[in-house]
Image: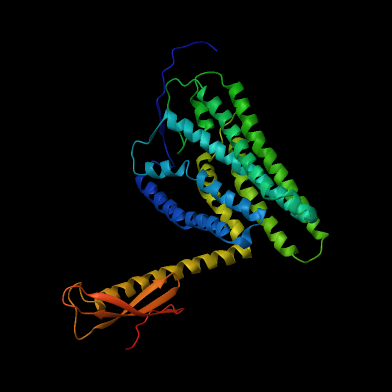
């Protein structure tokens, strides 16, 4: 490669999804609405699995990690995209672009490896059920999850190293809403055949192999279910079907974008939106809708939270009524020397009857009786 005086690129201009302001506002509305509905659902999935002891099996442990990975993955490109909807001049610094590239592929690869771990979990559960507790115990699960993060980090750091060595010499316009290795290669002002080949081997081949292995493994598992007894077959089959849907949702767009080396991909921006924004957040929801245990535990958690909010409101009302019932300090009502105090500790309402004595200078309160009631609705004693 010949040595030339290259202009140092310090920032990139992002063309975004559209240049029309009205279209941008419509997209902003729909993306925000989507986030307001789906993102809390993913967080609720994690809280449900972590808070319910009945969901302590490895499958739910991996599902909670998948939901967490998806939340992290969708925090890489969408925040910048949403912020750019309000800006006429969409730019991103070189360092931020490289960071976006690294985390995008780091988290994406970690998620693909985690899907393979989940396939292994289902294989052991179906084909070797008697050895399941030994082969997939808590220690093994933690090691496998750590390996997925480590593999994703290695994948991301390789692409990051290849990206920072691209010679960029002037043109800095990226026809997309985020930084990715394909757009950076187009801006390079040198022969990038070797770099593109390495990127394809590290990106396209990996995702194609993951998709092939996952699809083959779940096909074998579904065929294996046909030879087993009907007890619990529908539950396991629905779980495998949910896994297969997620595999197509995650790997399909990734293969379309990264599986075709050395050529431009039509409708790349549209596919990238589904790949980086829409599909990752919907993955845990697919598992949730296909699993009765998670739906039941999630409903219990939501009901418990609603009950807690109602009880907190009742407690505040009770305290307010108690303050209104007592006269200010130093002013004792001789007509109403007896008052009722209402307190609440979590779901238990504690009602205490107190007597206010009225000396000249220092009033004192003597607790005559404290009765604990399990009633949720606070009420006052009748004298």
Quadrant of the image occupied by residue 363 = bottom left
Left or right? Give the position of 210 relative to 90.
Answer: right
Q: Let me know if residue 321 appears in the view.
A: no
Residue occupying the far bottom of the picture: 383
Asked if 383 appears above or below 188 in the picture, the reply is below
Asked if 286 appears above or below 247 in the picture, the reply is below
Residue occupying the far top of the picture: 3
Q: In percent of the image, x 53 and y 51: which residue is there?
A: 281
For the C terminus, the quadrant is bottom left
Q: Relative to the observer, which residue lies in front, 78 or 57?
A: 57
Quadrant of the image occupied by residue 240 = bottom right
Left or right? Give the position of 198 relative to 15.
Answer: right
Spot occupied by residue 314 in the image (x, y as percentages of width and height): 37, 73
Q: Relative to the observer, which residue lies in front, 335 or 358?
A: 358
Asked if 228 appears above or below 79 in the picture, the reply is below
How many marks can you see? 0
Q: In percent of the image, x 75 and y 54: which residue is there?
A: 125
Spot occupied by residue 85 in the image (x, y as percentages of width and height): 37, 44
Q: In percent of the image, x 72 and y 53: which residue is there?
A: 122
Left or right? Give the position of 105 relative to 220.
Answer: left
Residue occupying the far right of the picture: 227
Spot occupied by residue 137 in the image (x, y as percentages of width and height): 70, 50
Spot occupied by residue 227 in the image (x, y as percentages of width and height): 83, 59
Left or right? Give the position of 102 relative to 362.
Answer: right
């Amino acid at each position: 490669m010949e040595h030339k005086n290259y202009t140092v690129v310090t920032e990139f201009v992002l063309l975004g999804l559209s240049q029309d302001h009205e279209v941008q506002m419509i997209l902003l509305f729909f993306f925000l609405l989507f986030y307001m509905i789906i993102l809390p659902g993913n967080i609720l999935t994690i809280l449900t699995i972590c808070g319910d002891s009945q969901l302590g099996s490895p499958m739910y442990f991996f599902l909670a990690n998948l939901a967490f990975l998806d939340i992290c993955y969708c925090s890489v490109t969408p925040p910048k995209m949403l912020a750019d909807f309000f800006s006429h001049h969409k730019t991103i610094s070189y360092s931020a672009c490289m960071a976006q590239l690294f985390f995008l592929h780091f988290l994406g690869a970690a998620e693909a490896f985690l899907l393979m771990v989940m396939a292994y979990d289902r294989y052991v559960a179906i084909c070797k059920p008697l050895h399941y507790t030994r082969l997939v115990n808590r220690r093994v699960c933690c090691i496998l999850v750590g390996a997925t993060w480590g593999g994703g980090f290695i994948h991301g750091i390789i692409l990051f190293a290849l990206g920072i060595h691209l010679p960029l010499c002037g043109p800095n316009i990226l026809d997309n809403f985020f930084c990715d290795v394909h757009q950076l290669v187009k801006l390079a002002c040198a022969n990038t055949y070797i770099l593109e080949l390495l990127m394809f081997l590290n990106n396209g081949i990996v995702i194609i192999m993951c998709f092939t292995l996952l699809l083959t493994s779940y096909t074998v598992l579904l065929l294996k279910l046909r030879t087993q007894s009907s007890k619990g077959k529908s539950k396991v089959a629905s779980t495998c079907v949910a896994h297969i849907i997620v595999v197509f949702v995650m790997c399909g767009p990734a293969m379309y974008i990264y599986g075709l080396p050395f050529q431009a991909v039509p409708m790349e921006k549209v596919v990238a939106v589904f790949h980086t924004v829409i599909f990752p957040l919907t993955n845990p929801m697919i598992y949730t809708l296909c699993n009765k245990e998670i739906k039941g535990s999630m409903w219990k958690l939501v009901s418990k939270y609603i009950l807690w909010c109602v009880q907190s409101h009742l407690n505040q009302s009770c305290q307010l009524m108690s303050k209104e019932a007592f006269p200010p300090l130093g002013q004792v009502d001789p007509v109403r020397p007896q008052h009722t105090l209402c307190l609440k500790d979590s779901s238990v309402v504690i009602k205490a009857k107190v007597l206010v004595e009225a000396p000249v200078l220092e009033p004192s309160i003597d607790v005559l009786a404290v009765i604990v009631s399990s009633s949720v609705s606070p009420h006052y004693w009748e004298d």
